[in-house]
Amino acid sequence: MNFLDHQKAEYYTHDLKEERPFKVIIRGLPLLDTNDLVDELKVKHKLDVLEVHRIKRRNEESISYHQQLYLAHFKRGTCSMAKLEAIRALHSIIIRWEPYRGGRKGPTQCLRCQGFGHGTRNCHIQPRCAVCAQMHLTDECNSSNVGDPAVKCINCGNNHSAGDKECLQRAKYIEVRKWASERTKKSQLTSRPSSMPPPASRNTAWSRKTPKPPIPAGFEYNLAQRLANAQASGFGHGTRNCHIQPRCAVCAQMHLTDECNSSNVGGTAVKCINCGNNHSARDKECPQRAQYIEVRKWASERTKKSQPTSRKNPAPALNS
């Protein structure tokens, strides 16, 4: 900010939530100089007050002398309503403290530059009058707000004050804020951070199958034959994504089954790669096949019942 001030740049900022002031309404005081109120709150009552403003109302002429409203800003965390309510009088006048529940409804509008979306406290833009749109504060203007030909809105250029609720730019700003709020609630893809993944959809890669892993370098084999002839050296996975050294389902040697010359029935070289007995690896009577089916059945039942880790029925062990 010091750099921007040094460059005489126009900018505005926003208060952090923890840095926003604690606002309270003071009732019962007459028309006083706000600097006198600040001095009494700071010196006499030792309060960390930031500023005090008199709240202007539309029916100023009909308001009693002793019915003025003041908005006091205190540093957050330094005082509470209970502490303030203990102060019964200011300038020897009985007062009443009330929580500030927000100002007028509608978008935030700066009273310095008349722009929307930020407050006056942190605005460092050239001041513009809300009545005549000239480059001075509104309180310094001599034009009348009603019927004066010099009245002009700095936002849309029409002949009304910048605070007019019928301003076209005000309506456009409300529309944009409403659209932005709905976009945030719906969590549309365009409003997501770049680090956040998009939602799963049928039209995205999230719903597609995992691509086939690459074949390791130096491990060459006939992929077409492996797809046509199921790999017989293990259970629980398919041929397409298997990159284990091929083993014959007949003789258990390290070649594809279609390349074997041994007979599947009565051959002395017939051997199961899984259990070591004299039958092919695809034999439904294979003990290892039966144990694998038992393990899968147990795992499926455990998932359905959602048993805890300390289950009573341990998993059956596979023979090595």
Image (cartoon, grey):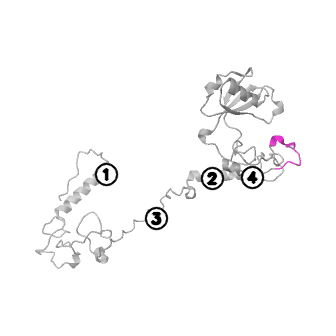
Mark 1 or mark 4, which has the lower sequence index? 4
Q: Position of residue 20 (x, y in %)?
A: 63, 38
The residue that mark 3 highlights is 205
Q: Position of residue 215 (x, y in %)?
A: 33, 71
The residue that mark 1 highlights is 303
Mark 2 or mark 3, which has the lower sequence index? 2
Mark 1 or 4: in front is 4
Residue nearer the viewer, 16 or 279: 16
Label 2 crowding class (10 Å Cα cut-off): few <14, some 14-19, many 20+?
A: few
Q: Which amino acid lies under the numbered mark 1 shown in the image of this protein?
A: Thr
Any part of residue 11 in sight: no
Furthest-top residue in this view: 92
Label 3 crowding class (10 Å Cα cut-off): few <14, some 14-19, many 20+?
A: few
The residue that mark 2 highlights is 180
Q: Considering the numbered disc 2 on the image, is that residue within a helix, a strand or a loop?
A: helix
Q: Is 180 a magenta residue?
A: no
Magenta span covers which residues? Answer: 138-152
Prevailing secondary structure of the magenta residues: loop
Residue nearer the viewer, 247 or 179: 247
Q: Which amino acid lies under the numbered mark 2 shown in the image of this protein?
A: Ala
Q: Which amino acid lies under the numbered mark 4 shown in the image of this protein?
A: Gln
Any part of residue 74 in sight: yes
Q: Position of residue 263 (x, y in %)?
A: 15, 77
Task: Look at the picture and state if 12 lies above or below 267.
Answer: above
Q: Considering the numbered disc 1 on the image, is that residue within a helix, a strand or a loop?
A: helix
**Marks 1 and 4 in Cβ contact (< 8 Å):** no
Q: Position of residue 11 (x, y in %)?
A: 70, 50
Mark 4 or mark 2, which has the lower sequence index? 4
Label 4 crowding class (10 Å Cα cut-off): few <14, some 14-19, many 20+?
A: some
Tell me how far mark 1 sits from mark 4, CA to CA: 60 Å
